[in-house]
Amino acid sequence: MHIADGYLSPETVVVSFAVAIPLWVYAFRKLKAKMNEETIPVLGALSALSFVIMMFNIPIPGGTSGHAVGATLIAIMIGPWVSFIAVSLVLLIQAVVFGDGGISALAVNALGMGLIASFSGYYLFELLKKYKFAPFIAGYTSLVFASFFVALILGIQPLFWSHDGTPLYFPFDLKVTIPMMVGGHLLFGIAEGIFTQVVYALLKKEKKVTYEI
Amino acid sequence: MKSNVFKILAVMVLLVPLGLLTQNPAWGEWESDYYIKILGYLPKGMADAKGVTPLLPDYSMKGGNEVLWYYLSALIGIVLIFAIFYAVSKIGKRRVSKS
């Protein structure tokens, strides 16, 4: 789901940053409000978990692979705004240090894997939290939603930005991106669901003591 | 530190080479050759793309041991994340004490 440099039209890049920057500013304030000596190590560790879980590439039939993101776990532990900024930070490090995802695509990547995954995961969990498998369902669905957003952004590139019928940026349209991206993430969502369920079960006793949403 | 989250993180880091078991790229994250093979050309925007040159592209170092660099990449990422969180908290504090 990490869009690379050169995949998005300049217009897409500008609009995505125009949407993301005010949200980052707001989320950053929320983050700072929650930071204290007790929460910083946990915040760091949950963000680090997101970074590491994204390194577990899972192959699927058809020759591609994918991975979990860990946004829902952070969202249900410390809140969706903090999760959004934490995943954005992880994506920034991945782009700059490891060439995983582009700098120009950072806003789109952060809106998908960060914002949409965090908020959909958070609210689904809140809705279902009396059920045992709420973390699994929230995690699973959040990844599918994020992949739908990324498929949408990639899929509109050839529709709007082609020259004489030749795509200038990402070349495959919605008829390809939606089934391929969302289809794949219907499987990778299982990994996100299991990760969220298991780690939440191990951490939930600490939640009440350490932080409030 | 009392939280279980550090134990979970340690276990995940130990297991991280499992992520190398597949050589399959993520859908849409192909090398330029793939597009040329499938489409017969590389879209202009992709060919002209300028990004920063990453320090450790694909979590590896050319000629280095794949597993070792995957471990090192995980540790580098984690150290950077903690460094940034601590830096942000320091900035926040300084502003509070000044005002």
Image (cartoon, rainbow, N blue to C red):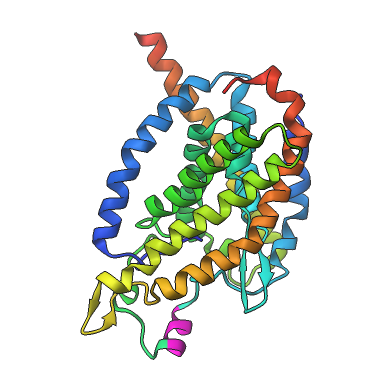
- Point out the image quarter for the N terminus of chain B: top right
- Outermost residue on the left side: it is A164
Q: Where is residue B79 in the image (x, y as percent from the top left)?
A: 60, 41
| Closest to the observer, A117 or B24 | A117
B71 to the left or right of A126: right
Question: Is residue B94 on the magenta stretch?
Answer: no
- Point out the image quarter for the C terminus of chain B: top left
Quarter of the image for residue A160 reads: bottom left
| In this view, A138 is above or below A202 | below
Q: Residue at the location (69% across, 49% down)? A: A193
Q: Is the magenta stretch mostly helix, strand or loop?
A: helix
B50 to the left or right of A75: left
Q: Residue at the location (65% across, 68% down)? A: B64
Question: Is residue B34 on the magenta stretch?
Answer: yes
Q: Residue at the location (33% across, 66% down)? A: B50
- Residue range in magenta is B32-38
A75 to the left or right of B36: right
| In this view, A207 is above or below A63 | above
| Closest to the observer, B41 or A125 | A125
Q: Can residue A42 be seen in this view?
A: yes
Q: Where is residue B86 in the image (x, y as percent from the top left)?
A: 53, 28
Q: Residue at the location (56% across, 49% down)? A: A142
Q: Position of residue A110 (x, y in %)?
A: 44, 48
Label total for image? 0
| In this view, A81 is above or below A59 | above
